[in-house]
Structures are given as C-alpha cells and as structure tokens.
Image: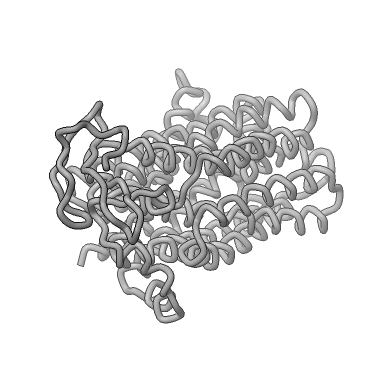
Amino acid sequence: MLSQNFRPEIILPKRPGSGRMSKSGGIRFIGVVMDGTEKREVIGSKGLHYWQGRAFFSMGILYLFYYFCKYNLSAATKDMQDDLGLSSSKIGLLITIFSLTYAGGQFLNGYLGDRFGPKRILLIGAFGGVIVNVCFGLSSTLAFFAAFWAANAYFSSCGWAPGSRIMFNWFPRQHWGKWMGIFNALCYTGSFLVFPIATYSISRWGWRSVFFVCPAFLLVMAILYCWLGKSSPHDAGLTTEWDSEEEKFVSEKLGKKDYWEALTNRKMNLAYLSGFGANFIRWGILSWMVKILAESISDGGFGMTLIAAGWITSFASLGGAFFSILMGIITDKVFKGSRWQMISFGLLVGSIPLLYLSKGAVILDQPHGVLIVGLAMFLSGGLIQAVQTPLFDLPGDILGRHMSGTGVGIMDGWMYLGAAFAGVFMGWWLDNYGYGSGIQLMGYVGIVSGLIAIPIQK
C-alpha cells in the first residue's frame, strides 16, 4: 500500500532502505519499508521532507528561547549593581557558578539525551528554566541569586547536546555542516533578540522584569514543542535512506566504555581545548560588553546609553548567526566535511577586531565611531561564536552518530569551563586592570585557541 503522498509511478523498494526515488513538490519519497509489522515511509538523502523541517525547526526555535532565560542576566547586570550595590566580582561569581553548573550538566545531559531520548531532556530543561528564572526575579540576596542561577544553569544545559543529537538523527552526514550552521544561527538569533527586548523591559519596568518577560517566550514554545517535536525519524513512524536499523537503536547500548572513549579521544581533546578558549571569549563578550559600552568614559567605558550598548552587543550574535550558516556551507561544500580550517580561521581572524576594540572610547572620536564599534562587534563576536558550527560537528564525525550527543555534551562541558573564567576571573580582571585590558585578553586567547585547532587535521 502506498501512503496518500505517493504518486502511482513510485516503485517500492525490494528490501529495507533501498529503492528508486521520485520527486514531488521538492520533497523526496522512496516508498515504504517493512519495520516488523509496520510500514514506514523512507526519507531520502536529498531534499527536505516535511517531518525533517518540523522536527528540526521546532527544536531549534525552542532552543532559541532557551537564550532568553540565560542571557537576560547580562542585560540586567548594570542596573542590578546600581540597585543592590554588587561589585563586578560578585556578578562575575554568578556567571562562574552558572558556567560551572552548566558544564557539569553538559557532561551528563548529552549522555542522558542519547540514552533516554533528547526530546524528553529538552522539555525538562525548558520548563525548569522558566520556573527558576521567576524565582530569581523575586530574590534579593546574593545567596538566593546564586542558588537559583545555578539551578537555571542545569536546566539550560538540557538543550544544546540533545538538540544536536536531534539534528544528527534527522539529516545525513553530508549535510551536517549546513544544518549545524542553521542550528547555531537560531541560537544566535535568540541571543541577538534577548538584549534589545531585555533592555527595553528594564527601561520600562526595572531590571527584575527581564526574569518574568523573557521566560514567557520559552514557556509558550515549550508547550508547542510537546506536540511538534520528535527525537528521530523512527519516533515519527519513518525510516531513512542513510541509516541501517542497527544504527538507529545502538544508543540503547551505550555504556561507560563509550563515554570514556568520547572523553579521551585525542582529536576530540584538541577540539575541547580550542572550544574552551572560544567560549571564554564568547561569554566575555556577552557577559560584560553591555556594561563596558554603557560605563562612563571617566571609569574606562565607552559612555553609551544602556539601550545603545544592548543593541551593539547584540551585533555579536547577529554576526554569529550569519557566519554560522556560512561556515557550515563551506565545511560541507569546500572542505568536504573537514572542519579544522574554519575553526582556526574564525578564531584567528575574529581576534583582530577585539584587539582593536581594546583601544576603548577613543574609537568613538573617529568619524562614524559608533558604526566602527558595531562592525567590530559583528566581526569578532560573529566569527568567534560561529566556530561552534564546525566544532560541534566533530563529535558526529569522529565518534559516530550513536555517540554524537554524548560527544557534544562533553564538548560543551569543556567550553563552559572556559566560560567560567569569563565570570569571576574576568570580573576580577576588569576591576583590577581595566576594561581595555580585558578586551585585549580575549583577543590573545582567541589567537591561541585558533592555533590549537590546527593539529585536528593530522
């Protein structure tokens, strides 16, 4: 029997996973296969099936709104400090607690997503993040801030690795670069949107409002994802042209030896270290640039308004979205699945505008100074954040699809150990050595991280 979407001339495959293909409205079908007693439609390796689009974009948009519940603190930092008298070191402590807890959650949740299903872990993170953000907004002491932000970090860590596993499940290897790039672009769209929305909310209702307004977006999408999302083609009653049935269910057999392999693989360790530096810079930009740009010139900042500082900082995420897609396409089409070239390029070239920004407010005295600062933020933040596209494809390339979520989780765990240094350490550095020196430090870390990625090729 043919499904209603099939045209009469389509030839059914003689055995599971094989057969001739036909095109219909840009969507490829190749008949049905027998899976036990079920008949399953087969998704081809080319084109975009309805279910691929639905499963991927619903997951990606859900994760986009995860960013509304973890970058809202960055937008509220200056007003929190003014209201509660918190030093940069104390705000940095919250960032470090978040990063360390997030890292620990990533080491665990990638494996849990592989073993128990990524959709389930994604939804736990979404609903949990909404609850603890509201609790944070109702708090007034550093102890409660730290406790709720640590809980928020764990729930936030339920998103990236399971989401990446869903991407690996729904697309063949030769398209991973493009779709990982689009996934990254959705993430950076979230971090691009959160700063203008959050700073507007603060200007109207005060800094606490961002911990109620921003989670509302995530809550609505989490409810929709309960219906829209599927972890894999098999969960949607489909099978794929590029996978054997044995490969689909191998994740159920994951054990300690598989985890150890993902943790100790030599090439992956180089990637982990490079990602460590990249995320130090990323969180340095997203955690501190609003404050640096909005701080008065006499105190070493750029002297911009809070809303202007929020918009310019968001250019880093806009650049991340643009360059993520570009890097993904280049790794697929130009380098044929080789990733190290784009990792090194993004880190080395992206460090140059950061070193230029370390000059400080004097840049604004030049013609079109604000435009120059925005362009530098777009290039540096964009290129350095976009290296996550090739970095997070490496676990699937090196470890295989069945351990891809585990590898992505370990990768992100190491990266958020790097982000931890962008918290209390960076806050201490800014308090003691100034804002320009802090931006310069990020530039030098980018150069070192770009060089570390080169040996991945060997």
Q: Position of residue 232 (x, y in %)?
A: 41, 52
- Would you say residue 153 is visible in this rendering? yes
In this view, 168 is above or below 303: below
- Would you say residue 345 is visible in this rendering? no
Q: Quadrant of the N terminus?
A: top left
Furthest residue toward bottom:
257
The image quadrant of residue 426 is bottom right
Q: Position of residue 394 (x, y in %)?
A: 32, 59
Furthest residue toward front:
1
In this view, 232 is above or below 257: above
Q: How is the image coloured?
A: one colour
183 left or right, relative to 217: left
Q: Position of residue 404 (x, y in %)?
A: 38, 62
The image quadrant of residue 196 is top right
Q: How many marks?
A: 0
288 left or right, relative to 208: left
31 left or right, relative to 185: left
Q: Name the one closer to the observer, 13 or 268.
A: 13
In this view, 242 is above or below 455: above
80 left or right, relative to 71: right
The image quadrant of residue 98 is bottom right
Q: Name the one closer to the observer, 252 or 61.
A: 252
Furthest residue toward right:
140
Q: Position of residue 117 (x, y in %)?
A: 50, 59
Residue under the image location 58 percent in, 63 percent down:
105
Q: Quadrant of the C terminus?
A: bottom left
Residue under the image location 32 percent in, 67 percent down:
399
Residue under the image location 63 percent in, 54 percent down:
124
Residue under the image location 38 percent in, 55 percent down:
392
